[in-house]
Image: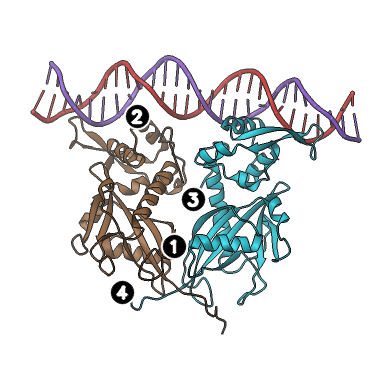
Chain colours: A cyan, B brown, C red, D purple
Amino acid sequence: MIEYSSQPHYLVAVDCIVFGFEEGRLKLLLVKRGLEPEINKWSLIGGFVGPEESTDDAALRVLKKNTGLEGVYLEQLKVYGKPDRDPVERTLSVAYFALIDIQKYSKQLNADYQAEWFLINESPQLIFDHNAMVADARQRLRYKAALHPILFELLPKKFTLPQLQLLFEEVNDMKIDTGNFNRKINSTGLLIKLDEKDKSSSKKGAFYFRLNHKKYQSASHLILNLIPGSKLDL
Amino acid sequence: MIEYSSQPHYLVAVDCIVFGFEEGRLKLLLVKRGLEPEINKWSLIGGFVGPEESTDDAALRVLKKNTGLEGVYLEQLKVYGKPDRDPVERTLSVAYFALIDIQKYSKQLNADYQAEWFLINESPQLIFDHNAMVADARQRLRYKAALHPILFELLPKKFTLPQLQLLFEEVNDMKIDTGNFNRKINSTGLLIKLDEKDKSSSKKGAFYFRLNHKKYQSASHLILNLIPGSKLDL
DNA sequence: CCAAAAGTGTTGTACCTACACCCATGG
DNA sequence: CCATGGGTGTAGGTACAACACTTTTGG
């Protein structure tokens, strides 16, 4: 039997930066940590990687356990591997970011786990290096969303153009011209206009749209150019 | 003393996808693996992460040991975390990709480690999931290079525009119009024209250029638009 | 009828592609 | 003097930013 003799072994965790979008604001899902150290402090959703699961599997499991959701958009962000990032024992963390439809979430088991949504700019101090993870994830989200139509993952099945524009403005932290935005979005062919209108925020009402899923699948690598002088950085 | 009781611990390795560019072709640095299993098969350069170093540090160490080079461009690619990716024992691998000036490399200790350059499209079968890592790294390189001027890291201090164009063509696997390419490159202000010419590949000779380092630093997030209808994908 | 949000039209400009063209020089 | 690779110029088209404009409807 071959073995790697005396190489050191470490704990491996996953942590998920979970983004949501509600009432025109970008939000972040946090939980109160359930174990020492730093018990009861706010933390990203996370857990240790089990012996029979991949890190991807572990992230999915953790996500399902805390939100009840499956089939959400999940992407590996990066590894945080400083030796002393966890004071108890060396633990590597593989960070993932998830985009979820916050409406779907609230229909699921809400109270079971004491998870809570925070406005992203008003979230509390987090444990360890979790604040850095969130900052990195926001940057990555901006970057990725500039090139790929992933932000739809944050919206309910039916949504309006003003809603979508607000989302883009939140993520990129800038105002966008409505005319140009609508024209570009429509030219992608990704949206299908419904007959129904949302009158909750104006008298005229804004038409609902839904995703053209066929187009969305095949165009997941499409390059949007929705953000004018975009200041990407990665 | 707090501890995370009985959570499982794993080995953690780093593997480096090292790119080079020579004679107009993109190359990959590989080594013959020095330990069982799969001893003497071709492999990425890699090693286990030591107890006192971060994964980034480990990658730098491994790179220095195998190429003698320091201060090279190095970026985390992603973690490969399937439970059975190493048949001996569960080992997570944090993959990094590096861009090195192959000229500098050959000046360093060349024969000490039995590393060898392969044309990227003619590289041998690699151990474990290393082939997948290379494929992912190529894609990431293309993606990143479309937005950031990182490809200069692959060139020597002095280089010509035709050389640079070849590099872009290799990385993106497409022909690029010379006129448009030159104009765009020049408009970035990233290059400084030297008086000297390289006459090795034509009678007229091509002017050498060097990087404007100040501009390069401050514009590391610059968005190049050098690849026409680019087919990015990540 | 008016305020306020939704959505459309228009126009000048910047940039980009394609391709024709000139340049330098070793043999 | 000509073949070859290096490098520049230019015309036509596209797409975009900016902003003025029309539409709808509840109060």
Residue closest to the far bottom: B1
Q: Chain of mark 1?
A: B
Q: Which residue is mark 2?
A: B177
Where disc 2 sits, the SS reads loop
Say which element carries label 3. loop
Within 10 Å of disc 4 (Cα), the crowding (few <14, some 14-19, many 20+) is few
Q: Position of residue B190 (x, y in %)?
A: 39, 41
Determine which residue is flagged by label 1. B82
Q: Nearer the viewer, residue B17 or A55?
A: A55
Kindly identify the amino acid type of the residue bearing the numbered disc 3.
Leu
Disc 2 marks which amino acid? Asp
Q: Residues within 10 Å of mark 1 (few under 14, many from 20)?
A: some
Mark 3 surroundings within 10 Å by alpha-carbon count, few (fewer than 14), some (14 through 19), many (20 or more): few
Do pointers 3 and 4 mark residues of a single chain? yes
- The alpha-carbon separation of the residues under discs 4 and 2 comes to 54 Å
Disc nearer the start of the sequence (3/4) = 4
Question: In the rendered image, is residue A132 in sight?
Answer: no
The disc placed on residue A2 is 4
Residues at marks 3 and 4, CA–CA distance in whole angstroms: 41 Å
Report helix, strand or loop for mark 4.
Answer: loop
Callout in the foreground (4, 2):
4
* Image mark 4: chain: A
Closer to the eye: label 3 or 1 = 1
Label 3 sits on residue: A234
